[in-house]
Image (cartoon, rainbow, N blue to C red):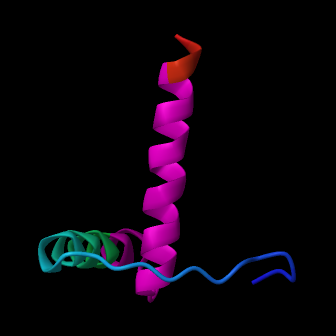
């Protein structure tokens, strides 16, 4: 984590957390490396923002 990174706390429903956990496990299988829940969430947020930003450009 860089010095500029901010700590963020959020609440997720059990269903959404299960989906995040499933994605985390997929990442572990793809990368063959341990993946934390925080890293999985960062990846999902980044991918979601990229998608939204691309759609805005259309």
Q: Is residue 35 visible?
A: no
The picture places residue 50, in percent across and down from the top left corner, at 54, 40
Q: Nearer the viewer, residue 13 or 31?
A: 13
Residue 16's x, y, as percent? Answer: 20, 69
- Seen from this angle, which residue lies furthest left? 15
Magenta segment range? 27-55
Residue found at x 19% / y 75%: 13
Estimate the x, y position of residue 44 in percent, counting from the top left: 43, 59
Viewport quadrant of the N terminus: bottom right
Query: Residue shown at 51%/77% (left/top)?
Result: 39
Left or right position of 4 against 18: right
Most common SS among magenta residues: helix
| In-front residue for pair 7/54 | 7
The answer to whether residue 12 shows anywhere in this view is yes
**Residue 2 in magenta stretch:** no
| Tally of marks | 0
């Amino acid at each position: 984590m860089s010095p500029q990174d901010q700590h963020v706390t959020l609440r997720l429903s059990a269903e959404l957390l299960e989906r995040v956990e499933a994605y985390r496990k997929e990442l572990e299988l793809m990368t063959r490396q341990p993946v934390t829940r925080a890293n999985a969430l960062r990846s999902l947020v980044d991918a979601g923002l990229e998608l939204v930003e691309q759609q805005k450009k259309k």
